[in-house]
Amino acid sequence: MSLDVVTFGCRLNITESEVIRRAAGELDDTVVVNTCAVTAEAVRQARQSIRRLKRERPDARIVVTGCAAQITPEKFAAMPEVARVIGNTEKLEPRAWGDERRIAVGDIMAVKRHVGHAVDSIEGHTRAFLQVQNGCDHRCTFCIIPFGRGNSRSLPVDEAVARARRLVARGHRELVLTGVDITSYGADLAGTPRLGALVKRVLKEIPELARLRLSSIDSVEADADLLDALASEPRLMPHLHLSLQSADDLILKRMRRRHTREQAIAFCNEVRRMRPDVAFGADIIAGFPTETEDMFARSLDLVDECGLTQLHVFPFSPRPGTPAARMPQVPRDAVKERARRLREKGEAALRSHLDAQVGERRLVLAERGGVGHTEQFTCVKLAAPAVPGTILDLTMTGHDGRQLLAA
């Protein structure tokens, strides 16, 4: 058997797993586990998967990489199932796959330039992902990811546009700009171009691109050009996934976030005024240290006040080495119960959003498996098979509580 890659976590890891397949070349009976470290649960799942893979394929050589491997390489190297551990920078370079060091993990903080690697297609995905940024300069008290990804670094604008053009030339109708903190894009580049400038360049210079989408953004960093593009360019999809994390100002301060509750609400209202068809998703943490019931209630209320339709709910998970891990913790039962209530609130908000879509016509990007997504990134179950990548003009006839049904 040849190389297999098992991927956990974000779109960046999905993209980088394709690079790994090319960088590693032909390796006999090898499984690469590309890990995530965003929560303790993500790390636990990766370790569990490693053990399961070894039971299922006892002769396979298991190599571990990704953020969790970058942060704690020794812990993975100590697993008897693991043959090698490779860092987040090294995993993208062919030479790292040619040596036999058990631990090949460098200093991620010493990496100053975003090289990136062009990926023309991703197995199992219809839309294309273009990584334009990596790393993060912020130090939120709950987050370990900067230690897995390093400091923020950006792909130069000309190179990003050239890669986008190449992806479109290969037939991709929709392109997603991705990164760890894409709204910090350009701060390290000459002239400090912002994300909005990049978005406008891509849309202007590649008129044949049908749809451009953004991955998660930090609303406080959204620049004027980005907002102008949302207001004036229909090819920039009306869906924003926001890194909100909480809606209580004291908790936001303890998280070391850079926005307030009122700023988050004002941002959503302003974008909705400029682009009435916009839909918002958000990341929210339940049970952050010192969070009281009243503080948590403000996060529940934010779902309605911002008009959120899709939630990624994270029960707080203390990450060793972060300031939040040393703060007074909320009891685990309370954390889980708050996460449950927040998920229920999100499910109700999604149902309301789906209700409002019934009877409407939407442009849907057909994907594999008989599904697609609207411009607002709402999942749609197609009534009949369609060629992946086709954009269909469909009437929404109903929903099942999770996705729309199309005629």
Image (cartoon, rainbow, N blue to C red):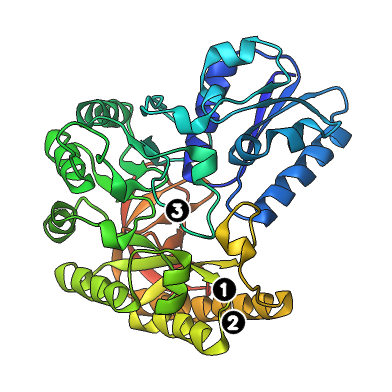
Amino acid type assigned to the residue bearing label 1 in the image: Ala
Image quadrant holding the C terminus, namely bottom left
**Is 50 located above or below residue 399 in the figure?**
above
Q: Which residue is mark 2?
A: 341
Q: Which residue is mark 3?
A: 139
Disc nearest the viewer among 2 and 1: 1
Q: Which residue is mark 1?
A: 286
Question: How many angstroms separate mark 2 from mark 1 (CA)?
Answer: 9 Å
Task: Count neighbours of disc 1 (C-alpha within 10 A) and say few if under 14, some if 14 to 19, many if 20 or more.
Answer: many
Q: Residue at x 56, y 75 (%)?
A: 343
Give the secondary structure at mark 2. Answer: helix
x, y (%) of residue 374? 35, 59
**Is 291 located above or below residue 1 in the figure?**
below
Report which quarter residue 359 is drawn in.
Answer: bottom left
Report which quarter residue 333 is drawn in.
Answer: bottom right
User: Which of the two discs, 2 and 1, labels the residue nearer the N terminus?
Assistant: 1
Amino acid type assigned to the residue bearing label 2 in the image: Arg
Question: How many angstroms separate mark 1 from mark 3 (CA)?
Answer: 19 Å
Does residue 376 appear in the picture of this structure?
no
Horizontal relation, residue 239 to residue 317: left or right: left
Task: Count neighbours of disc 3 (C-alpha within 10 A) and say few if under 14, some if 14 to 19, many if 20 or more.
Answer: some
x, y (%) of residue 351? 47, 78
Q: Tell me whether circle 2 and circle 1 mark residues in contact (CB < 8 Å).
A: yes
Q: Residue at x 67, y 39 (%)?
A: 72
Disc nearest the viewer among 3 and 2: 3
Give the secondary structure at mark 3. Answer: loop
x, y (%) of residue 100? 71, 12
Horizontal relation, residue 243 to residue 96: left or right: left
Report which quarter residue 387 is drawn in.
Answer: top left
